[in-house]
Image: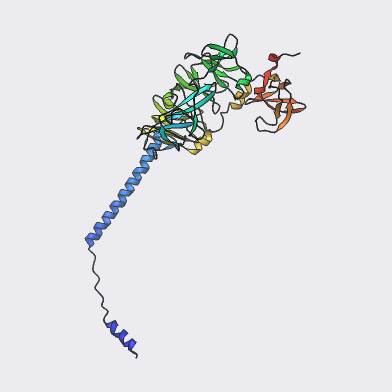
Amino acid sequence: MGKGACDMKRKSKDIYFSKKKTANKGLVALAVVAASAILAAGGYFAAKTVTEAREERAEIGRCSWSTKGFENVSDVKSFDEKIAVFTDAENGKQGLMTLKGEITEEANYDSFSVCSDVWGVKKYIAAGGGEHPLLVDVINGKVTGRQYHGPETPAKSVCWNQAAKSLVWIDSKGYAGQVQKSEIASVKGLFPVATSVSEDAKWGFADANLNVRITLSYDSVCEFSNGLAAVESEGKWGYITENEIIKISPVYESAANENIGGKDTSFGFRNGLAPVKKDGKFGIIDKSGNAVVNFVFDKIIQGKDGKYLAMRNSKWGIITVDEEKVTATSAPAPETTTQQAVLYDLGEYTVATAGSPLNLRRDAKSDSPVLRKIPNGTTLNVEKTQAGWAFVEFDGVSGWVSMKYLEPFSQTGKN
């Protein structure tokens, strides 16, 4: 046997094995108890969290509620339902965020406001960012570098003249002329109109043909959205359809304090939902007046895609309404097609453009293919209407034309 093998044999005799120590049974038991206690505590707190979440959901309605990311926000207001103005709790300055809570402009400004230099045209202003107020791009939620030097109130307003039974312009001195269709060519559907510019004026709605379609009997009104408009009567707000059917009774309070303008107002519908205030608390209703979010919030402002900026227990956060509820209510109100059809009388109308031909389109929408060009002054027979469009026949072809460029035949005369 070689030397290596002898060395290996000798080393094997030097290997010793220790006797295995017995673990302390008391310590093991204590460790098991401690571990069990930790697991039980974790399970308890997890169960408690789930239970509290369920209880909160039952309290607030079909939505979730989160304050994450709003720790330094002390106040939020709606910026004309287009974007939100928030106040930073630390520096007291204001900035801009989307209606979903995403900051688009840091809090570096003293204040934001809505101004108007002409009727129907609003300007959004930021103050404190320089020597002069700056214009705000509310689509993107950004303060621009362009200065604003215009007035805070409109130079003139559209009012209904009962004596002349027509719409007229009113300025600071009074009557300022008749309203022409070309002056409100950008108007789509119905728009608010008042009996005067005084605070006690009565409000209703007119159409692009300068006809009053909803009686001027309300204390205040807001523009139509999702087929409904908020109207105020005897200090309470409700919602009507475009043929003046009361869809939701006037039982809600003003949302003035939640709007940057601070004027008596109510929020419109978006995605079939609207935040409303009742008995000092806010909730969210659908177009049938049913509460989707219960009236337990101190503030809720207009949202987007089922998300709403809100305050509860002095904390701001985001309400996220159940997706299926938003989807189920996002369609127009059932009355919309019928309502629009009765806004205009059927019969003969005359094409009244500035001289250019009127497009006869295949469908009742502005991007539909053009079938024919109808000369100005042509008399057409309106067979039916739909959402501001008229179905007519010209040159043996039937299609749709915009009611904005038609005048009742009786008003134009016949040679």
The N terminus: image quadrant:
bottom left
Q: Quick check: 131 left or right of 335?
A: left
Q: Position of residue 211 (x, y in %)?
A: 61, 17
Q: Quick check: 395 left or right of 90?
A: right
The C terminus: image quadrant:
top right
Q: Quick check: 162 left or right of 3?
A: right
298 vs 67: above or below: above
Q: Quick check: 121 left or right of 108?
A: right
Residue 247 in sight in this render = no
Residue 350 in sight in this render = yes
Quarter location, residue 255: top left
Q: Position of residue 355 (x, y in %)?
A: 71, 22
Farthest-out residue, top: 163
Q: Nearer the viewer, residue 352 or 15?
A: 352
Look at 49% across and 38% down and name the residue there. 323
Q: Position of residue 197 (x, y in %)?
A: 50, 14
Q: Position of residue 63 (x, y in %)?
A: 44, 36
- How many dots with numbers? 0
Quarter location, residue 400: top right
Look at 75% across and 25% down and name the residue there. 394
Look at 35% across and 45% down and name the residue there. 47
